[in-house]
Image (spheres, rainbow, N blue to C red):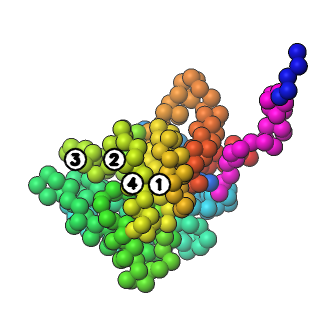
Amino acid sequence: MYLQRRNRILRQTPAIRALVAETNLTPNDFIAPIFIDEGSNIQTEIASMPGYYRRSLDLTVADCKELWAMGIKSVLLFIKCKDELKDNKGTEAWNPDGLMQRAIKAIKNAIPEMVVMTDVALDPYSEYGHDGIVHNGEIVNDETVEALVKMSVSHAQAGADIVAPSDMMDGRIGAIRQGLEETGFTKTGILAYSAKYASCFYGPFRDALDSAPGFGDKKTYQMNYANRIEAIKETMMDIEEGADIVMVKPAMAYLDIIREIKNTVDVPVSAYHVSGEYAMIKAAGKMGWIDENKAIIESLTSIKRAGADLIATYFAKDAVRLLG
């Protein structure tokens, strides 16, 4: 049998496969989400996210030092707000002495080179658990955007490198960019959650921060998962308004969206490998139904192969160890 072309030649050994691999993961690809709580020397495992923790600020700084030593250069901060500090307008979100602001300062003081990204949305601070201010059962847009600008400027004042609006309110990227410019924070970047879908895969995250909506759902502001063209429209609008990086969330069920956006835009594309995706791999691995370590690397590779330049993932540490 004579064949002009034998494709298996380039698959024969691990060394050959590595040599011709089209997609390669490195620690530079990862953003590590961090959950922060009040107190001291506190580490609470999140029941629906086995092996992942909500930590007090002192242990968070230690964790960030470990991440940096592993080669992970970026963290995305989320805080658990005390119930007594929550209100409808989320005013704790721009408290200069709030937990988020203290966390930014502590991490930047400990590891100045670490890229600190901050979540910008009202749900952790809202008595209703929604990403915006509620009037008569409606999540209102424009008043929420004003609050998000205050929140973003407060994060920049504390030292954040990049603010990451995850709320999906209309016009918030342009308003935040204007707010940062007018207050002199011309070097603060914006990572826009541009195509954030109303997904069932966020459940464990809401357990982590006690931020589940108190009524209804988030479908009036997060995107319909049936839509593809809308994601491109939303993303292009965010770029026109001043986004430096755009994001697709979730990642694994939306690889087609990541690729569509990567083919369309000329800014870095990020993707969020969300809590539900993490939990599924963990659960299947625990039951012995899949090889957890192989699933981690295959999943993250698929996200990068789809076009993500950056991946926010709860597997950041595991992936770096496995990549060795």
Q: Magenta span covers which residues?
A: 6-28
Q: Are marks 2 and 1 in contact (CB under 8 Å)?
A: no
Residue 162 coordinates in the image, percent (x, y):
48, 68
The percent coordinates of residue 122 (x first, y second) are 30, 60
Q: CA gap, disc 2 to disc 1?
A: 13 Å
| 204 in relation to 79, above or below | above
Residue at numbered disc 1:
247
Q: Is residue 240 visible?
A: yes
Q: Which residue is mark 2?
A: 223
Residue type indicated by callout 1: Met
Residue 302's quadrant in the figure?
Answer: top right
Q: Is residue 72 above or below residue 219?
A: below
In the image, which is nearer the foreground, mark 4 or mark 2? 4
Whole-percent x, y for residue 113 in the image: 61, 71
- Mark 3 and mark 4 lie on one chain; the one further toward the N terminus is 3
For label 3, the residue is 214
Q: Is residue 61 or residue 24 the one in the foreground?
A: 24
Of the numbered discs 1 and 4, the one sitting upstream in the chain is 4
Residue at 51%, 54% (x, y): give it: 264
| Marks 1/4: CA–CA distance | 13 Å
Asked if labels 4 and 1 touch by Cβ distance under 8 angstroms, the answer is no
Q: Which numbered disc, 2 or 3, marks the residue that appears first in the sequence? A: 3
Seen as rendered, the residue at the extreme left is 136
User: Helix, strand or loop at disc 1?
Assistant: strand
Looking at the rendered structure, the secondary structure element under dot 3 is loop
Asked if residue 288 lies in the magenta stretch, the reply is: no
